[in-house]
Amino acid sequence: MRDAVAAALAGMARPGLLPVVFADARYGAVLENWLRHAMRAGVAETLVVALDAETEAACRGRPGLGVLGLRHAGTLASLWALRLRLFAVLTRAGVGFVHSDADAVWVADPRPALAALPGDLVFSLGTVWPSAAHVAWGFVLCCGLFAARPGPAVAAFLDGLAAEAEAGQPDDQVLLNHRLLAAGTTWDWSGVPRRERPFRDTVLADPARPLPGACAALGLRLWVLPQAWVPRLPERLPESLVLHPLSPKEPEAKAGLLRGLGAWG
């Protein structure tokens, strides 16, 4: 994979954190919507990870796109393992990046806000899965939008997650949260107002501004973003940078939900 990554990055200026987005042909319209919004937000370069030949062909040669063709076994577990291995390779290559799901639409460029946070990993908030993290922290970390700066501790952490996923652990978000929870990650709420957001039959702890954290055992400095910056609920607020509402897997359903938020087309 290292040689393929180097080839995809060749010729890209890569200023700051590089956006990375995965897609296959089934999600072609979702990817195109993401790219349109990212371009409008001022994103000049994106690394597109094309999971099939059709997507690879559709993206090659387009200005501002680095295209990395990767294949997996077709299951969600194999996709999560592939994603984690790529993240590890990028950090080993000294590349800082922001991973974004294709349905996490950039209505503004989040990278200036992320770059202002002096940490190793910056996460958007999920909802309640995995439950152990929600019980312990009041929130969970979401893999759908997160940033990583290169460094030995980050590379070692992502290498470890990738190895676990390749060994058969089926869910990258579960792996991430459980690993940080088991390693004794703490969050510093001092000076950060804590909101309680109703969600189904529980509540989500929501910091009013970025919440710092640390995992001394892994040598990591962490941040969590407010829900309003990257809402997982179907809402669009004045401070929203990325819209990532919970939605079914079907592309048509995602399109309808994003259209209702003014984030489609």
Image: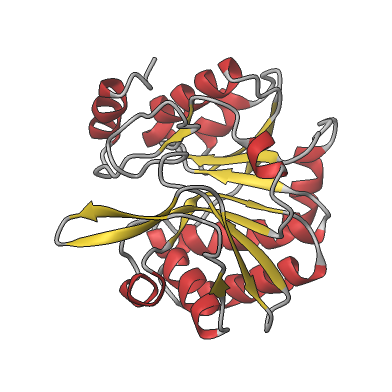
Q: How many marks?
A: 0
The image quadrant that residue 62 belongs to is top right
At 31% across and 59% down in the image, what residue appears?
A: 204
Here the colouring is secondary structure
User: Residue 212, percent across and down?
Assistant: 60, 61
- Nearest the camera: 263 or 134? 134
At 39% across and 34% down in the image, what residue appears?
A: 27
Image check: 246 left or right of 32? left
User: Residue 151, percent across and down?
Assistant: 81, 63
- Which of the image's four quarters has the C terminus? top left
Q: Is residue 53 above or below residue 33?
A: below
The image quadrant that residue 196 belongs to is bottom left
Q: In this view, does 261 lie above or below 174?
A: above
Q: Residue furthest front?
A: 191
Image check: 146 left or right of 9? left
The image quadrant that residue 174 belongs to is bottom left
User: Residue 165, percent across and down?
Assistant: 51, 72
Q: Is residue 184 above or below residue 55?
A: below
- Nearest the camera: 97 or 131? 131
- Which of the image's four quarters has the N terminus? bottom right
At 47% across and 23% down in the image, what residue appears?
A: 32
At 63% across and 45% down in the image, what residue appears?
A: 98
User: Residue 249, percent across and down?
Assistant: 28, 44
- Nearest the camera: 25 or 152? 152
